[in-house]
Amino acid sequence: MTSRTVLFSIALLFSLVAQVALAGDLPDFTELVKKYSPAVVNVSTVQANPHRRSSGSPQLDEFFRRFFPPDRRGNPFGGQRRSLGSGFIISEDGYVLTNNHVVEDADEIIVRLSDRRELVATLVGADPRSDLALLKIEAEDLPVVQLGESDALEVGEWVLAIGSPFGFDYSVTAGIVSAKGRSLPNENNENYVPFIQTDVAINPGNSGGPLFDLDGRVVGINSQIYTRSGGYMGVSFAIPIDIAMGVVEQLKADGRVSRGWLGVVIQDVSRDLAESFGLDKPGGALVARVLDGGPADVGGLKEGDIIVTYNGSDIDLSSDLPHLVGRSRAGGEVDVVIVREGKRKTLQVMVGELADDQAVSRAGSHGGSTPSPLGLVVEELNEAARQRANTSFGVRVVESEGPAHAAGIRQGDVITRLNNEEVDSVETFNDVVDRLQRGRSVPVLIVRGQSPTFLALRVPDD
């Protein structure tokens, strides 16, 4: 035996020992799958008129594709369309949880059990905002899943999914929790679900299936994937089970879901905005608009307030606020801690109920007088401009250059507040500009289209 052969044999031995040691540290999912996979079901639907289904936002379709594959193997001339997803049984008497987009607009819903029985399901209720649907099948002594606590999940923890990707029933994939509290606004710019991000392999047909922890408890419902190709790319999202069960309770009781509503438009606080508002660091939800007569308006919130705590929970990102408000009980009073002109203040706000045409919205992040030091030329608003901007006051930007252009202010924008002062005329605007402290950033509230957005504008030194 040559020395080269000996070295190769030793290297191979060490490699095998390392693989065995590594395998010994990996979790064994076999018992979990045997015990709980019977409670996972296949959900198929028939839609007589496929043209009724809405395609949603084109921008979101490109990145967050709902993942249940249409099956067009039915009568190609009859217009029927079939779709496929997953679900799981949460009670022995036949309640089944799945995604709303799996059963949306379905004329018939079929639930196939692990023993191959196929039962027609009744839609108890659905909640498009959380993408959840509760079904009921007529059966008894059914296998059920064990429910866990998604709030107790840790990033890096092992999780496992069971579902029907591409129609392959009871497929099992595993991975880890990649992040928690992900905000994924839908086509209405609403984000009421703090998603669990995982690297579990999820594909079309997994939608609505359970996400298990190592103890066999369901901690989430697989709902979305990030994809440019339509298939798995290593980023998947699940609805936390704590959120889902709150929805289930309301759907059982009322067939609908009630959510809290503040009546504000909010945006993130960037580093420049934090400086302009006198904050030590970015954080909180910046109020860009208070809707007239809404709960926030009645409770005393104003444009330019920064919400840093809601009902005892800190707000680090603006996307944290809708999750908390949505879970609040309509009609209840909550403490809202704000920063106004550099000082903290606590307001008591009576939470309203979110209607179909309302939302805790997030503002978009956008970047004649004589020219001001800010590089702005503004003019009075005429009636047409007021109507276009949906505001009763402000000044319209005629020219924007230098510091103003660098801040993101553009021709046609309407400025309604500058350095936390209301701007109702060109005279007021010039007066505020004259009093600005040189060499620091100040907040400016613009309306572009009908969307209010705060920008940080740095005042030049000279």
Image (spheres, rainbow, N blue to C red):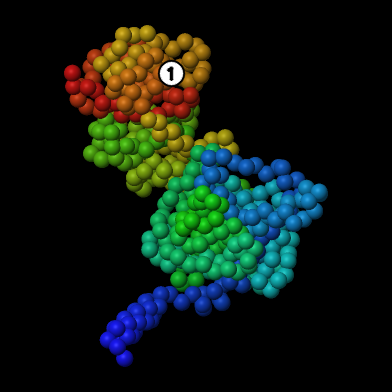
At 62% from the left edge and 50% from the top edge, which residue is drawn?
101
Q: Determine whether 51 is above or below 217 in the image.
A: above
Pointer 1 local density, CA inside 10 Å: few below 14, some 14–19, many at least 20: some
Q: Measured from the top left, where is residue 264 in percent x and y?
A: 44, 33
Circle 1: residue type: Gly
Residue 153 in which image quadrant: bottom left
Quarter of the image that includes the C terminus: top left
Q: Measured from the top left, where is residue 461 in percent x and y?
A: 18, 22
In the image: residue 210, left or right of residue 19: right
In the image: residue 211, left or right of residue 165: left
86 or 81: nearer the viewer: 81
Going by the picture, which residue comes out furthest to the front? Answer: 2
Q: Measured from the top left, where is residue 189 in percent x and y?
A: 50, 39
Helix, strand or loop at label 1? It is loop
Going by the picture, which residue comes out furthest to the bottom? Answer: 1
At 70% from the left edge and 56% from the top edge, which residue is drawn?
71
Q: Measured from the top left, where is residue 152 in percent x and y?
A: 40, 62
Please state the total of marks drawn on the protein image.
1
Question: Which residue is under mark 1?
Answer: 412
At 69% from the left edge and 47% from the top edge, which residue is drawn?
105
Can residue 416 be spotted in the picture? no
Quarter of the image that includes the N terminus: bottom left
Q: Determine whether 177 is above or below 5 in the image.
A: above
Q: Determine whether 35 is above or below 97 in the image.
A: below
Q: Determine whether 263 is above or below 45 in the image.
A: above
In the image: residue 128, left or right of residue 408: right
Can residue 19 be spotted in the picture? yes
At 56% from the left edge and 77% from the top edge, which residue is drawn?
34
344 or 350: nearer the viewer: 344
In the image: residue 392, left or right of residue 40: left
